[in-house]
Image: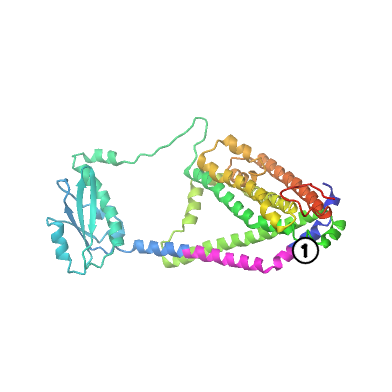
Amino acid sequence: MNKKMLKGWKDVFSFTFSQTLKGKGFYASTVGIGILLIGILVAIHVAVAVSGKSDQEPSKVSTVHIVNNSDLTQVDFSDFSLIVGDKYKKVSIQVEEKTTKELLKELSDEKGTDLVVEITNEKDTYYLNGMIPAESALKKKDARGLLDQLTILLQKNKISSVSIEPEKLTVLLAPVQIQIAKVGEENQSDGEIIVKMILPMIISFFLYMMAMAYGQSISKAMIAEKNSKIIELLLTSIKPYAIILGKMLAMVSVALLQMFIWIGCIFIGLFAGDYVGKQIDSEFNNVIFGTFKMLRDSGAKNAFTVETVVLAVIILMVGFIFICSIAGLVGAASSKPEDLAVNMTYFTMPVLIGFFAAYFMPMAGAAPSVVKILTFIPVTAPFLAPSELLVGNMNMLEAGLVLLVLLISCGVLVYFAGKTYRNKVFYNNTKSKGFKLFSKEA
C-alpha cells in the first residue's frame, strides 16, 4: 500500500471527526455518562462511609443475659471485654440461673436494651439463640454483630470443657496457612497473584465494552453515502483506502476522546468520593486506594514501570484500532442497513473470542505457553498483551513484535476494506447478500 493510495485521508478524517463531534448524541452521552460515573462513585463512597461510621458507634445493647441450656457444665464470658473492640466495650455480660422464659417475662414490659442469649446444642452442633424482648428498643441488626463476638468465646468454652492446658490450647487454635512453591520459580506475592488474576479481566472487559459501543457506529459510517452518486465522484479524486482509513481513524479518535473524558470523570469521582467520605467519617479508608497500596507494598509494583505502562497503552490503542478495522471491513462489505445487521456477526465473533480468552484464562489457570501464543494472534492480542506486559510476563521485545503484528493486521484490513468498498460502489453491488468481499456485478 503506497502513499498515493492513502492520499486525502486527512481530509476525510477532519470532516468525519468534526461532524461526529457536532452531533448531539456525542455531547449528551459524554456528559451524561461522565456525570453518572462521578455520581455513582461518590454515592458508593458515601454509603461505605456512613456504614463504617455506624459500625464504629457503641452498641445499643446494654446487657446480655446468658442462659446455658447446653451440655457444657459451665460457661465463662469474663474475657468478653478483652477480645471485643470499642463498639462492645460497654456491654455487660451476665450468666443467669433463671430460665429463658422467666427472663423474657421480666424484660417484656421494659423498653430497655437488654438481650437474652440462650446456648443450646444438638449432638455436636451448638447454637447461640438471641432473643429480643417484646418492648425492647433493640433491632435484629443490633444483636447480630454481638452474637458474632460471643461465638468466639463459646468456641473457647467448648475447648476448655475437655480440660486442655492453655499452652496446648494456643497451639490448637493457631491458624494454618498453605504455601506452594515450585523449584526453579520465584515465589509470587499475594499482590502479584491478585494483579495477574484481575488485571486481564479488567482490561479485556473495558476493551470489549468499547468495541461493542463503537463497532456498529463505525460500520454504519462505512455505508452512510454508499448508495449516493456523490461517493462515486469522491472516489475519482480520493482512493477508497483513504476514505476507509480516514473514516475509521476519525471514529476511533472520537471513541478515545470520549474514553479519556470518562476516565477523567472516574478519577474525579474517586477523589471527590474519598474527600466526602472522610468528611463523614474521619477514619474512612478508601477501598480502592487501599487496594493499590496493598499491591505496591506486596511487591507487584516491580512490573509496572513507566516504559511498560506507555507501551501497554499504545498496544491497547492499536488493538482497538484493529478491532475497529474489522468493523470497517464489515461496513464496507454491507450495502444496506439490513445487510449490516446480518454481517455484524463477523465482527462480534472475533471480539467475543478475544474477550473470553482474556477474561476466563486467568481463572482457568491456562498454561503460560498457551497465553504466550495467544498474545501474538491479532484477534486475542489486544485483550491479552497489555496485561501480560504490565505484570512482567512479556518483555519489551515481545511487546514490540505484538505491536508490529497488530499494525500489519490493521493495514491488511484497511486494504481489503478499501477494495471491497470500491467494488460495492463502482460495480453497483447493492443486491448481494451475506458477507462477500470481492463479488462484482456488471
The image shows residue 23 at horizontal and vertical percentages of 69, 68
The residue nearer to you, when weighing 92 against 227, is: 227
Residue 74 picture location, percent across and down: 15, 48
Which residue is the site of mark 1? 15
Q: Would residue 358 be visible to someone looking at this image?
A: yes
Q: Is residue 350 left or right of residue 409?
A: left
Q: Main secondary structure of the magenta part?
A: helix
Colour mode?
Answer: rainbow
The answer to which image quadrant residue 50 occupies is: bottom left
Q: Is residue 89 above or below residue 307?
A: below
- Which residue lies at the image location 81% right of the left edge and 60% below the top edge? 11
The magenta segment: 17-43
Q: Is residue 419 left or right of residue 51?
A: right
- Please identify the quarter of the rendering in which residue 18 is found: bottom right
Residue at the spot x=76%, y=45% of the render? 412
Amino acid under label 1? Phe
- Could you tell me residue 140's position as x and y percent? 29, 61
Whether the magenta-drawn stretch holds residue 29 is answered as yes
Task: State the residue at coordinates (70%, 58%).
Answer: 337
Residue 289 horizontal/vertical position (percent)? 49, 56
Q: Is residue 299 visible?
A: no
Q: Is residue 168 above or below residue 92?
A: above
Element type where label 1 sits in the image: helix
